[in-house]
Amino acid sequence: MSGYVARTGRQAGRSAAGRSVAGTNLEHARSHNRRVVLDVVRRLGPLSRAEIARETALTNQTISNIVDELELAGFLLPGVPTREGRGQPPIPYGINPEGAWSLGFHVDHRAITGALVDLTGRPVALREVAAQRPSPQDAAPILRRLADELAAEARIEPSRLLGAGLALPVRFDVGAITTAGPTTLPGWDGPDMRLHLSRTLGQPVLIENDAMAAAIGERLHGAARDIDSFVFLFLDQGLGAGLFLGGQPWRGASLNAGEIGHMIVVPGGRPCPCGNRGCLERYVSLSAAQEFLADDPASDTAIDLAAASPERLERWIDEAAPHLAAAVNILESTLDPETILLGGVAPAALLARLIEKAMPLPMSVGSRTGRDRPRLIAGAVGRHTVALGAASLPIFDEINPRFDVLLKR
Ligand SMILES: [Zn+2]
Protein backbone atom coordinates (compact mmCIF):
# COMPACT_ATOMS: atom_id res chain seq x y z
CA MET A 1 0.00 0.00 0.00
CA SER A 2 1.23 3.50 -0.80
CA GLY A 3 0.69 6.58 1.38
CA TYR A 4 -2.45 8.43 0.55
CA VAL A 5 -4.18 6.60 -2.25
CA ALA A 6 -2.31 6.52 -5.53
CA ARG A 7 -0.54 9.81 -5.05
CA THR A 8 0.74 9.83 -8.58
CA GLY A 9 3.53 12.10 -9.67
CA ARG A 10 2.12 12.08 -13.15
CA GLN A 11 -1.52 11.89 -14.12
CA ALA A 12 -0.77 10.39 -17.51
CA GLY A 13 -2.56 7.82 -19.55
CA ARG A 14 -4.99 7.63 -22.37
CA SER A 15 -7.87 9.98 -22.19
CA ALA A 16 -10.14 8.49 -24.85
CA ALA A 17 -13.43 7.31 -23.40
CA GLY A 18 -13.48 3.87 -21.84
CA ARG A 19 -10.42 2.65 -23.73
CA SER A 20 -8.28 0.05 -22.00
CA VAL A 21 -4.92 1.00 -20.61
CA ALA A 22 -2.02 -0.73 -22.38
CA GLY A 23 0.28 -2.94 -20.38
CA THR A 24 4.01 -2.96 -20.72
CA ASN A 25 6.19 -5.93 -21.49
CA LEU A 26 9.14 -4.65 -19.43
CA GLU A 27 10.00 -6.93 -16.55
CA HIS A 28 10.06 -4.20 -13.86
CA ALA A 29 6.43 -3.34 -14.48
CA ARG A 30 4.82 -6.53 -13.20
CA SER A 31 2.69 -4.78 -10.63
CA HIS A 32 1.46 -2.31 -13.25
CA ASN A 33 0.47 -5.20 -15.52
CA ARG A 34 -1.35 -6.94 -12.68
CA ARG A 35 -3.45 -3.81 -12.17
CA VAL A 36 -4.05 -3.43 -15.90
CA VAL A 37 -5.39 -6.99 -16.06
CA LEU A 38 -7.63 -6.56 -13.00
CA ASP A 39 -8.90 -3.23 -14.33
CA VAL A 40 -9.79 -4.71 -17.74
CA VAL A 41 -11.55 -7.71 -16.18
CA ARG A 42 -13.40 -5.43 -13.75
CA ARG A 43 -14.71 -3.21 -16.55
CA LEU A 44 -15.22 -5.66 -19.39
CA GLY A 45 -15.14 -9.15 -17.83
CA PRO A 46 -15.55 -12.01 -17.83
CA LEU A 47 -12.80 -12.29 -20.46
CA SER A 48 -10.66 -15.09 -21.84
CA ARG A 49 -6.85 -14.90 -21.70
CA ALA A 50 -6.76 -14.07 -25.43
CA GLU A 51 -9.28 -11.28 -24.97
CA ILE A 52 -7.31 -9.85 -22.04
CA ALA A 53 -4.14 -9.97 -24.15
CA ARG A 54 -5.90 -8.11 -26.98
CA GLU A 55 -7.30 -5.43 -24.67
CA THR A 56 -4.02 -4.80 -22.86
CA ALA A 57 -1.58 -5.18 -25.76
CA LEU A 58 0.41 -7.65 -23.65
CA THR A 59 1.84 -10.93 -24.91
CA ASN A 60 -0.13 -14.15 -24.44
CA GLN A 61 2.69 -15.49 -22.26
CA THR A 62 2.63 -12.45 -19.96
CA ILE A 63 -1.15 -12.66 -19.64
CA SER A 64 -0.99 -16.37 -18.95
CA ASN A 65 1.46 -15.81 -16.08
CA ILE A 66 -0.52 -12.94 -14.58
CA VAL A 67 -3.87 -14.73 -14.84
CA ASP A 68 -2.35 -17.82 -13.15
CA GLU A 69 -0.94 -15.63 -10.41
CA LEU A 70 -4.23 -13.74 -9.88
CA GLU A 71 -6.25 -16.94 -9.89
CA LEU A 72 -3.91 -18.43 -7.29
CA ALA A 73 -4.26 -15.27 -5.17
CA GLY A 74 -8.04 -15.71 -5.41
CA PHE A 75 -8.66 -12.41 -7.23
CA LEU A 76 -9.78 -13.98 -10.52
CA LEU A 77 -12.35 -16.73 -10.84
CA PRO A 78 -12.47 -19.04 -13.87
CA GLY A 79 -15.96 -19.39 -15.37
CA VAL A 80 -17.54 -22.06 -17.54
CA PRO A 81 -15.93 -22.21 -21.01
CA THR A 82 -18.24 -21.31 -23.87
CA ARG A 83 -17.87 -23.55 -26.91
CA GLU A 84 -17.41 -21.72 -30.19
CA GLY A 85 -16.17 -23.68 -33.19
CA ARG A 86 -13.54 -26.40 -32.90
CA GLY A 87 -10.68 -26.74 -30.46
CA GLN A 88 -10.53 -26.20 -26.75
CA PRO A 89 -13.06 -23.56 -25.64
CA PRO A 90 -11.50 -20.55 -23.83
CA ILE A 91 -12.09 -20.11 -20.11
CA PRO A 92 -13.61 -16.73 -19.19
CA TYR A 93 -12.16 -15.02 -16.09
CA GLY A 94 -14.08 -12.64 -13.85
CA ILE A 95 -13.36 -10.83 -10.58
CA ASN A 96 -13.84 -13.23 -7.67
CA PRO A 97 -16.21 -11.41 -5.27
CA GLU A 98 -14.87 -13.45 -2.38
CA GLY A 99 -11.23 -12.98 -3.37
CA ALA A 100 -10.78 -10.29 -0.75
CA TRP A 101 -12.76 -7.93 1.42
CA SER A 102 -12.26 -4.37 2.48
CA LEU A 103 -13.44 -2.04 5.24
CA GLY A 104 -14.55 1.54 4.81
CA PHE A 105 -15.44 4.27 7.30
CA HIS A 106 -17.08 7.62 6.81
CA VAL A 107 -16.54 9.97 9.73
CA ASP A 108 -18.55 13.19 9.65
CA HIS A 109 -20.20 15.70 12.00
CA ARG A 110 -23.04 13.48 13.10
CA ALA A 111 -22.05 9.86 12.65
CA ILE A 112 -19.46 7.22 11.90
CA THR A 113 -20.60 4.82 9.20
CA GLY A 114 -18.75 1.56 8.56
CA ALA A 115 -19.05 -0.75 5.57
CA LEU A 116 -17.53 -4.08 4.65
CA VAL A 117 -17.49 -4.84 0.93
CA ASP A 118 -16.38 -7.75 -1.24
CA LEU A 119 -13.88 -7.40 -4.11
CA THR A 120 -16.65 -6.29 -6.50
CA GLY A 121 -17.64 -3.50 -4.08
CA ARG A 122 -20.88 -5.15 -3.00
CA PRO A 123 -21.70 -4.20 0.61
CA VAL A 124 -21.80 -7.28 2.84
CA ALA A 125 -22.36 -5.39 6.11
CA LEU A 126 -23.17 -1.76 7.01
CA ARG A 127 -23.44 -0.04 10.40
CA GLU A 128 -23.86 3.51 11.62
CA VAL A 129 -23.07 4.98 15.06
CA ALA A 130 -24.12 8.49 16.08
CA ALA A 131 -21.17 10.74 17.01
CA GLN A 132 -21.11 14.54 17.37
CA ARG A 133 -18.06 16.03 15.60
CA PRO A 134 -15.82 13.18 16.78
CA SER A 135 -12.13 13.82 17.40
CA PRO A 136 -9.65 11.05 16.45
CA GLN A 137 -9.55 10.08 20.17
CA ASP A 138 -13.37 9.80 20.33
CA ALA A 139 -13.50 7.87 17.09
CA ALA A 140 -10.77 5.28 17.75
CA PRO A 141 -12.78 2.92 20.01
CA ILE A 142 -15.86 3.27 17.76
CA LEU A 143 -13.84 2.40 14.65
CA ARG A 144 -12.32 -0.62 16.36
CA ARG A 145 -15.70 -1.84 17.56
CA LEU A 146 -17.34 -1.29 14.16
CA ALA A 147 -14.51 -3.18 12.42
CA ASP A 148 -15.01 -6.18 14.73
CA GLU A 149 -18.80 -6.12 14.39
CA LEU A 150 -18.74 -5.81 10.61
CA ALA A 151 -16.25 -8.67 10.24
CA ALA A 152 -18.29 -10.84 12.63
CA GLU A 153 -21.56 -10.06 10.83
CA ALA A 154 -20.02 -10.90 7.46
CA ARG A 155 -18.11 -13.88 8.95
CA ILE A 156 -14.84 -12.66 7.50
CA GLU A 157 -11.50 -13.42 9.11
CA PRO A 158 -9.58 -10.11 9.58
CA SER A 159 -6.67 -11.75 7.73
CA ARG A 160 -8.79 -11.79 4.54
CA LEU A 161 -9.13 -8.00 4.54
CA LEU A 162 -7.12 -5.95 2.04
CA GLY A 163 -7.20 -3.01 4.43
CA ALA A 164 -9.41 -0.12 5.46
CA GLY A 165 -10.28 3.20 3.90
CA LEU A 166 -11.27 6.25 5.91
CA ALA A 167 -13.11 9.20 4.40
CA LEU A 168 -13.26 12.55 6.17
CA PRO A 169 -14.63 16.02 5.48
CA VAL A 170 -11.16 17.57 5.72
CA ARG A 171 -8.46 18.81 3.43
CA PHE A 172 -4.79 18.06 3.86
CA ASP A 173 -1.87 20.28 4.83
CA VAL A 174 -3.67 23.55 4.36
CA GLY A 175 -4.31 26.68 6.33
CA ALA A 176 -7.41 28.50 7.49
CA ILE A 177 -9.69 28.06 4.51
CA THR A 178 -10.56 24.44 5.18
CA THR A 179 -10.33 24.15 8.94
CA ALA A 180 -12.97 26.87 9.41
CA GLY A 181 -16.72 26.52 9.44
CA PRO A 182 -19.35 23.82 9.84
CA THR A 183 -18.15 21.72 6.92
CA THR A 184 -14.85 20.49 8.28
CA LEU A 185 -13.82 18.19 11.10
CA PRO A 186 -10.86 19.52 13.09
CA GLY A 187 -8.09 17.43 14.62
CA TRP A 188 -7.79 14.83 11.86
CA ASP A 189 -5.07 16.38 9.73
CA GLY A 190 -2.07 15.42 11.86
CA PRO A 191 0.96 13.96 10.06
CA ASP A 192 0.83 10.57 11.82
CA MET A 193 -2.91 10.03 11.46
CA ARG A 194 -2.60 7.15 9.00
CA LEU A 195 -0.11 5.30 11.18
CA HIS A 196 -2.22 5.92 14.26
CA LEU A 197 -5.36 4.56 12.56
CA SER A 198 -3.47 1.56 11.15
CA ARG A 199 -2.47 0.66 14.71
CA THR A 200 -6.04 1.20 15.95
CA LEU A 201 -7.51 -1.10 13.32
CA GLY A 202 -4.63 -3.56 12.88
CA GLN A 203 -4.97 -2.98 9.12
CA PRO A 204 -3.26 -0.83 6.52
CA VAL A 205 -5.34 2.36 6.30
CA LEU A 206 -5.81 4.79 3.43
CA ILE A 207 -7.23 8.25 4.11
CA GLU A 208 -9.14 10.27 1.57
CA ASN A 209 -11.43 13.27 1.65
CA ASP A 210 -15.13 12.41 1.44
CA ALA A 211 -15.73 13.77 -2.08
CA MET A 212 -12.79 11.88 -3.62
CA ALA A 213 -13.68 8.67 -1.75
CA ALA A 214 -17.22 8.87 -3.14
CA ALA A 215 -15.83 9.56 -6.63
CA ILE A 216 -13.56 6.51 -6.42
CA GLY A 217 -16.58 4.43 -5.32
CA GLU A 218 -18.57 5.66 -8.34
CA ARG A 219 -15.60 4.89 -10.59
CA LEU A 220 -15.15 1.35 -9.29
CA HIS A 221 -18.74 0.25 -8.80
CA GLY A 222 -21.18 3.03 -9.65
CA ALA A 223 -22.31 5.37 -12.40
CA ALA A 224 -18.75 6.19 -13.55
CA ARG A 225 -17.61 2.58 -14.11
CA ASP A 226 -16.69 3.22 -17.73
CA ILE A 227 -16.05 6.97 -17.57
CA ASP A 228 -12.39 8.04 -17.56
CA SER A 229 -12.87 11.80 -17.14
CA PHE A 230 -15.59 13.05 -14.83
CA VAL A 231 -16.34 15.40 -11.97
CA PHE A 232 -18.21 14.00 -9.00
CA LEU A 233 -20.07 16.77 -7.14
CA PHE A 234 -20.49 15.80 -3.53
CA LEU A 235 -23.45 17.49 -1.84
CA ASP A 236 -23.13 17.34 1.92
CA GLN A 237 -23.02 20.04 4.59
CA GLY A 238 -20.66 21.70 2.10
CA LEU A 239 -20.05 21.11 -1.60
CA GLY A 240 -16.90 19.34 -2.75
CA ALA A 241 -15.80 17.57 -5.91
CA GLY A 242 -13.79 14.47 -6.74
CA LEU A 243 -11.99 14.81 -10.09
CA PHE A 244 -11.04 11.96 -12.40
CA LEU A 245 -9.01 12.89 -15.45
CA GLY A 246 -7.80 10.29 -17.95
CA GLY A 247 -8.70 7.43 -15.59
CA GLN A 248 -6.69 8.83 -12.66
CA PRO A 249 -7.86 10.76 -9.62
CA TRP A 250 -6.66 14.36 -9.86
CA ARG A 251 -5.59 15.67 -6.45
CA GLY A 252 -3.78 18.88 -7.28
CA ALA A 253 -0.49 20.31 -6.03
CA SER A 254 -1.49 20.25 -2.33
CA LEU A 255 -3.96 17.33 -2.53
CA ASN A 256 -6.88 19.75 -2.34
CA ALA A 257 -8.22 19.87 -5.90
CA GLY A 258 -12.02 19.88 -6.04
CA GLU A 259 -12.56 22.39 -3.26
CA ILE A 260 -15.23 23.97 -5.43
CA GLY A 261 -17.57 24.94 -2.59
CA HIS A 262 -15.42 28.02 -2.18
CA MET A 263 -15.55 29.16 -5.81
CA ILE A 264 -17.07 32.64 -5.70
CA VAL A 265 -20.28 32.57 -7.74
CA VAL A 266 -21.97 35.69 -6.32
CA PRO A 267 -19.41 38.51 -5.90
CA GLY A 268 -20.27 40.35 -2.68
CA GLY A 269 -22.84 37.64 -1.82
CA ARG A 270 -23.46 35.74 1.39
CA PRO A 271 -20.53 35.69 3.84
CA CYS A 272 -18.74 32.33 4.12
CA PRO A 273 -16.77 31.02 7.14
CA CYS A 274 -13.72 30.87 4.82
CA GLY A 275 -13.63 34.68 4.87
CA ASN A 276 -14.91 35.29 1.34
CA ARG A 277 -18.39 36.24 0.20
CA GLY A 278 -20.64 34.51 -2.32
CA CYS A 279 -19.02 31.05 -2.19
CA LEU A 280 -20.90 28.33 -4.11
CA GLU A 281 -21.59 26.21 -1.02
CA ARG A 282 -23.38 29.12 0.64
CA TYR A 283 -26.09 28.47 -2.00
CA VAL A 284 -25.70 24.79 -2.97
CA SER A 285 -25.20 22.52 0.07
CA LEU A 286 -27.27 20.89 2.78
CA SER A 287 -26.26 23.58 5.24
CA ALA A 288 -27.51 26.22 2.77
CA ALA A 289 -30.80 24.30 2.49
CA GLN A 290 -31.11 24.03 6.26
CA GLU A 291 -30.45 27.71 6.69
CA PHE A 292 -33.06 28.56 4.05
CA LEU A 293 -35.64 26.33 5.77
CA ALA A 294 -34.92 27.42 9.35
CA ASP A 295 -37.29 29.92 10.92
CA ASP A 296 -34.33 31.35 12.76
CA PRO A 297 -31.33 31.30 10.41
CA ALA A 298 -28.97 32.05 13.32
CA SER A 299 -30.04 28.88 15.14
CA ASP A 300 -27.52 26.05 15.22
CA THR A 301 -30.12 23.27 15.16
CA ALA A 302 -30.02 21.11 12.03
CA ILE A 303 -33.28 20.96 10.09
CA ASP A 304 -34.40 17.52 9.00
CA LEU A 305 -34.82 17.86 5.23
CA ALA A 306 -37.09 14.82 5.09
CA ALA A 307 -39.48 16.56 7.50
CA ALA A 308 -39.36 19.96 5.73
CA SER A 309 -42.40 21.31 3.93
CA PRO A 310 -42.15 20.24 0.26
CA GLU A 311 -43.14 23.73 -0.93
CA ARG A 312 -40.36 25.42 1.02
CA LEU A 313 -37.83 22.80 -0.05
CA GLU A 314 -38.90 23.43 -3.65
CA ARG A 315 -38.32 27.16 -3.16
CA TRP A 316 -34.79 26.40 -1.96
CA ILE A 317 -34.21 24.17 -5.01
CA ASP A 318 -35.38 27.07 -7.22
CA GLU A 319 -32.77 29.26 -5.58
CA ALA A 320 -29.92 26.70 -5.62
CA ALA A 321 -30.36 25.18 -9.11
CA PRO A 322 -29.09 28.20 -11.15
CA HIS A 323 -25.90 28.22 -9.04
CA LEU A 324 -25.47 24.49 -9.65
CA ALA A 325 -25.93 25.12 -13.39
CA ALA A 326 -23.28 27.87 -13.26
CA ALA A 327 -20.86 25.45 -11.53
CA VAL A 328 -21.44 22.87 -14.28
CA ASN A 329 -20.62 25.52 -16.88
CA ILE A 330 -17.38 26.48 -15.05
CA LEU A 331 -16.24 22.88 -14.54
CA GLU A 332 -16.97 21.93 -18.16
CA SER A 333 -15.19 25.02 -19.44
CA THR A 334 -12.14 24.24 -17.31
CA LEU A 335 -11.89 20.44 -17.52
CA ASP A 336 -14.01 19.27 -20.48
CA PRO A 337 -15.11 16.09 -18.66
CA GLU A 338 -17.23 13.35 -20.24
CA THR A 339 -19.94 14.11 -17.68
CA ILE A 340 -20.59 15.57 -14.23
CA LEU A 341 -22.19 13.46 -11.50
CA LEU A 342 -24.15 14.79 -8.56
CA GLY A 343 -24.24 12.61 -5.47
CA GLY A 344 -23.76 12.67 -1.75
CA VAL A 345 -25.63 11.97 1.43
CA ALA A 346 -28.69 14.02 0.35
CA PRO A 347 -31.90 12.07 -0.43
CA ALA A 348 -31.95 10.74 -4.02
CA ALA A 349 -35.22 12.58 -4.75
CA LEU A 350 -33.65 15.91 -3.77
CA LEU A 351 -30.60 15.29 -6.01
CA ALA A 352 -32.89 14.35 -8.92
CA ARG A 353 -34.96 17.51 -8.43
CA LEU A 354 -31.83 19.71 -8.31
CA ILE A 355 -30.62 18.19 -11.59
CA GLU A 356 -34.04 18.68 -13.18
CA LYS A 357 -34.26 22.30 -12.07
CA ALA A 358 -30.70 23.05 -13.29
CA MET A 359 -31.92 22.44 -16.84
CA PRO A 360 -31.44 23.83 -19.40
CA LEU A 361 -27.74 24.13 -18.61
CA PRO A 362 -25.90 27.18 -19.93
CA MET A 363 -23.90 26.67 -23.11
CA SER A 364 -20.31 25.44 -22.74
CA VAL A 365 -17.91 23.02 -24.45
CA GLY A 366 -20.11 20.39 -22.78
CA SER A 367 -22.98 21.35 -25.13
CA ARG A 368 -21.27 19.39 -27.92
CA THR A 369 -23.46 17.26 -30.16
CA GLY A 370 -23.12 13.49 -30.31
CA ARG A 371 -22.73 13.08 -26.55
CA ASP A 372 -23.43 9.56 -25.34
CA ARG A 373 -24.57 10.66 -21.87
CA PRO A 374 -26.16 13.78 -20.39
CA ARG A 375 -23.99 16.62 -19.05
CA LEU A 376 -25.24 16.26 -15.45
CA ILE A 377 -26.36 12.92 -13.99
CA ALA A 378 -27.03 11.47 -10.55
CA GLY A 379 -24.52 9.22 -8.79
CA ALA A 380 -25.56 5.58 -8.40
CA VAL A 381 -24.17 4.56 -5.03
CA GLY A 382 -26.73 6.33 -2.80
CA ARG A 383 -26.83 7.45 0.81
CA HIS A 384 -23.87 5.37 1.96
CA THR A 385 -21.79 6.54 -0.98
CA VAL A 386 -18.89 7.79 1.17
CA ALA A 387 -18.55 4.71 3.42
CA LEU A 388 -18.74 2.45 0.36
CA GLY A 389 -16.30 4.72 -1.46
CA ALA A 390 -13.94 4.53 1.53
CA ALA A 391 -14.20 0.74 1.44
CA SER A 392 -13.24 0.80 -2.22
CA LEU A 393 -9.96 2.70 -1.50
CA PRO A 394 -7.89 -0.41 -0.67
CA ILE A 395 -9.40 -2.20 -3.69
CA PHE A 396 -8.72 0.77 -5.96
CA ASP A 397 -5.16 0.89 -4.63
CA GLU A 398 -4.82 -2.78 -5.54
CA ILE A 399 -6.35 -2.70 -9.02
CA ASN A 400 -6.17 0.76 -10.65
CA PRO A 401 -3.27 1.04 -13.13
CA ARG A 402 -0.85 3.69 -11.93
CA PHE A 403 1.62 5.33 -14.20
CA ASP A 404 4.11 6.30 -11.54
CA VAL A 405 4.99 2.60 -11.24
CA LEU A 406 6.45 2.75 -14.74
CA LEU A 407 8.70 5.65 -13.85
CA LYS A 408 10.53 3.84 -11.06
CA ARG A 409 14.05 2.75 -11.83
ZN1 LIG B 1 -16.04 30.06 1.23
Image (cartoon, rainbow, N blue to C red):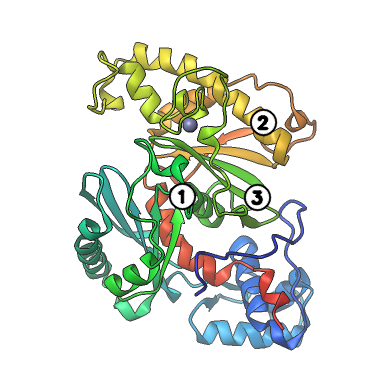
In the picture, the quarter occupied by the C terminus is: bottom right
Compare residues 79 and 291 and report the one nearer the observer.
291
Q: Return the disc, 1 or 3, that comes first in the chain's sequence.
A: 1
Vertical placement of residue 404 versus 239, above or below:
below
Disc 1/disc 3 C-alpha distance (Å)? 25 Å
Q: Residue at x 24, y 27 (%)?
A: 300
| Mark-to-mark CA distance, 2 and 3 | 20 Å
Residue 227, label in figure: 3
Is residue 10 rendered to the left or right of residue 344? right
Residue 260: percent from left, percent from top: 55, 37
Asked whether residue 253 appears in the rendered view, the answer is yes
Residue at 63% across / 30% down in the picture? Answer: 328
Three-letter residue code for mark 2: Ile
User: What secondary structure is marked by label 2?
Assistant: helix
x, y percentage for residue 241? Answer: 54, 42
Q: Is residue 402 left or right of residue 166?
A: right
Q: CA distance from mark 1 to mark 2?
A: 22 Å
Q: Is mark 2 within 8 Å of ligand 1?
A: no
Q: Residues within 10 Å of mark 2 (few under 14, many from 20)?
A: some
N-term-proximal mark, 1 vs 2: 1
| Amino acid residing under circle 1 | Arg
- Residue 405, quarter of the rendered image: bottom right
Instruction: Point out the frontmost of discs 2 and 3.
Output: 2
Residue at the spot of label 1? 171
The nearer-to-camera label among 1 and 2 is 1
Q: Is mark 1 within 8 Å of ligand 1?
A: no
Report the number of numbered marks. 3
Residue carrying label 2: 330
Tell me the kind of residue under disc 3.
Ile
| Front residue of 149 and 135 | 135
Q: Quadrant of residue 382?
A: top left
